[in-house]
């Protein structure tokens, strides 16, 4: 195509003689579609994860038809290339609509096909598309070998499509509620492998019968041109709930801090405990129970049991090599140290570039952090696999209070995609299960400090006293959780090592997590940098 003709083609209105069913085979359409028009659309989407980088160009990596009874939509696998010399892949389903009043905010491209005016839109906005997807899963056959693979599990019981609606605002994916009883998650950023959320959900539900995660109902996977099995959608049971455990914990901790004044508590006289000391509720001093209430500790016991049951299920597989437990070895040690040191250096650079944003307690702590950076670095190098006897298993990988739903007096664990910054391969690495426990402990720490930051003026105590009370509360939360968790794990013969090993792994993983958090806070919420800094220095000083 000559440059002159190309320039003419790229001017709206765009008109093509192809039919919708053959449009993606028309090079002229593809050239127009992949131009600035698509770039501008993608840059506006919440699910687009490349906003901090400079987009260079978009390629159509592959397309496939999502169809039924002559009704056709396209699924696009897009490769977004960046000026920083890396790329990301995204899934975008598209539809052609002619109704001028429809989806005004989600139009990608106005065009005319065979003398019919209309728009290319993201197909998820179209109920007809959502209905087709649901029915393709509902009518799927076992052992589907076609390139677009629809699958349903034995838990799928619906016999007809009734309704669908958007679940709400999300960042990285798009979720649709079907029939008010199930939810499908369309993965937007995709990888040349099965998504861990799909793998873990299917494994826990179908193979292990784990009850405290949304039941796996079905999925859509694509076999791409390189024969990679790519997950584009996951269908799960909708769990009616009262919100997530993060909001639950904020409310509980607010009540606990409110009790300081109500109970006339002198913070300096509160009984304390050693961090990682395993505690049955009867071991918690009556003064702490009187202050915090018995209820929160009973809930933590339930949360600990659900966490342990998840790990027991994940650690009890001996056929599927993707889930069979492994021991520590030199390969894991090298991988872990390289990853930890790279992340630490990255966060260190972020701290040094943002020092001017800190004041008060944060400024004091960051000074100590920088003075002791070599000591922290040495901590990451102390990992010696030959001294560790426990097992490594597939874990949640991004476990925190926001990944847990509260229902009645129980908890449901969800979102097994893994750490957002990690590669797809790294998300499937087997870790000590205590890495998840370390993540939830860091989340407890965050909930306590977030309560102080958000509500501190409500409590007639100095911030210093509130921080001190929070640290006491944190240790008792950890102690009660740990006792319930370890007791159940050991009763089911999952090897998480002896006590000294367990404490070493918890400290190592909590240090790693707090360093990870520090980079985010320095860039986004410098006032909150005190939370990971307190966590880092507590471990270093212990």
Image (cartoon, helix red, strand yellow):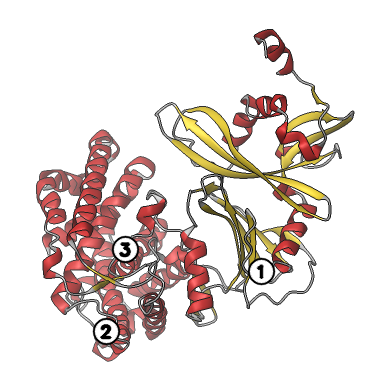
**How far is the residue under mark 3 from the one under mark 1?**
31 Å
The extreme bottom residue here reads 282
**How far is the residue under mark 2 from the one under mark 1?**
45 Å
Q: Is residue 383 visible?
A: yes
Pair 2/3: label in front: 3
Relative vertical location of residue 448 with respect to residue 48 in this rendering, above or below:
below
**How far is the residue under mark 2 from the one under mark 3?**
24 Å
Residue marked by disc 3: 442
Q: Position of residue 488 (x, y in %)?
A: 32, 86
Pair 2/1: label in front: 1
Residue 261 tag number = none
Pair 3/1: label in front: 1
Q: Earlier in the sequence, mark 3 or mark 1?
A: 1
Disc 2 secondary structure class: helix
Q: Who's the residue at 37% across and 45% down the image? A: 525
Q: How crowded is mark 1: few (under 14 residues within 10 Å), some or many (20 or more)?
A: many
Residue marked by disc 2: 287
**Considering the image in quadrants, where does the C terminus appear?**
bottom left
Q: Which of marks 2 and 1 is nearer the N terminus?
A: 1
Q: Position of residue 481 (x, y in %)?
A: 32, 78
Residue 182 tag number = 1
Q: How crowded is mark 3: few (under 14 residues within 10 Å), some or many (20 or more)?
A: many
Name the quadrant containing residue 363.
Answer: top left
């Amino acid at each position: 195509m000559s440059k002159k003709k190309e320039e003419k083609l790229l001017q709206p209105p765009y008109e093509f003689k192809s039919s919708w069913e053959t449009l993606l085979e028309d090079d002229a359409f593809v050239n127009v579609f992949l131009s600035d028009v698509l770039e501008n659309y993608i840059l506006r989407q919440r699910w687009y994860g490349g906003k901090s980088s400079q987009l260079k160009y978009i390629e159509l990596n592959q397309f496939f038809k999502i169809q039924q009874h002559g009704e056709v939509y396209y699924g696009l696998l897009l490769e977004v290339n960046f000026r920083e010399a890396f790329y990301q892949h995204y899934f975008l389903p598209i539809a052609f609509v002619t109704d001028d009043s429809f989806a005004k905010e989600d139009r990608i491209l106005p065009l005319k096909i065979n003398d019919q005016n209309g728009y290319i839109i993201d197909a998820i906005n179209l109920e007809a598309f959502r209905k087709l997807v649901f029915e393709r899963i509902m009518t799927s056959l076992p052992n589907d070998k076609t390139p677009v693979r629809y699958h349903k599990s034995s838990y799928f019981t619906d016999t007809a499509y009734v309704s669908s609606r958007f679940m709400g605002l999300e960042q990285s994916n798009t979720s649709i509620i079907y029939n008010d009883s199930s939810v499908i998650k369309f993965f937007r950023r995709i990888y040349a492998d099965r998504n861990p959320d799909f793998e873990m959900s299917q494994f826990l539900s179908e193979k292990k019968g784990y009850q405290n995660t949304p039941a796996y109902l079905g999925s859509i996977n694509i076999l791409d041109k390189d024969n990679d099995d790519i997950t584009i959608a996951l269908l799960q049971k909708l769990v009616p709930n009262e919100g997530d455990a993060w909001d639950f914990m904020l409310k509980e901790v607010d009540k606990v801090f409110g009790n300081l004044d109500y109970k006339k508590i002198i913070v300096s006289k509160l009984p304390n405990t050693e961090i990682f000391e395993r505690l049955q509720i009867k071991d918690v001093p009556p003064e702490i129970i009187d202050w915090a209430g018995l209820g929160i500790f009973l809930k933590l016991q339930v949360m600990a049991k659900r966490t342990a049951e998840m790990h027991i299920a994940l650690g009890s597989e001996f056929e599927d090599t993707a889930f069979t437990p492994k021991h520590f070895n030199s390969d894991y040690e090298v991988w872990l140290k390289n990853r930890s040191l790279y992340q630490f250096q990255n966060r260190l650079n972020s701290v040094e570039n943002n020092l001017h944003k800190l004041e008060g307690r944060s400024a004091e702590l960051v000074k100590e952090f920088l003075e002791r950076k070599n000591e922290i670095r040495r901590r990451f190098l102390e990992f010696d696999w030959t001294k560790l006897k426990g097992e490594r298993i597939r874990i949640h990988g991004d476990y925190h209070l926001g990944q847990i739903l509260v229902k009645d007096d129980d908890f449901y664990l969800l979102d097994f995609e893994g750490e957002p910054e990690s590669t797809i391969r790294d998300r499937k690495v087997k870790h000590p299960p205590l890495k998840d426990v370390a993540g939830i402990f860091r989340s407890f720490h965050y909930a306590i400090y977030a309560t102080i930051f958000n509500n501190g003026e409500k409590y007639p105590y100095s911030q210093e006293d509130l921080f001190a009370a929070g640290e006491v509360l944190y240790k008792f939360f950890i102690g009660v959780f740990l006792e319930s968790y370890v007791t159940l794990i050991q009763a089911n013969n999952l090897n998480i090592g002896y006590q000294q090993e367990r404490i070493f792994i918890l400290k190592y993983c909590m240090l790693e997590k707090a360093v990870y958090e520090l980079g985010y806070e320095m860039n986004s919420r410098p006032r909150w940098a005190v939370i990971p800094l307190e966590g880092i220095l507590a471990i270093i000083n212990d």
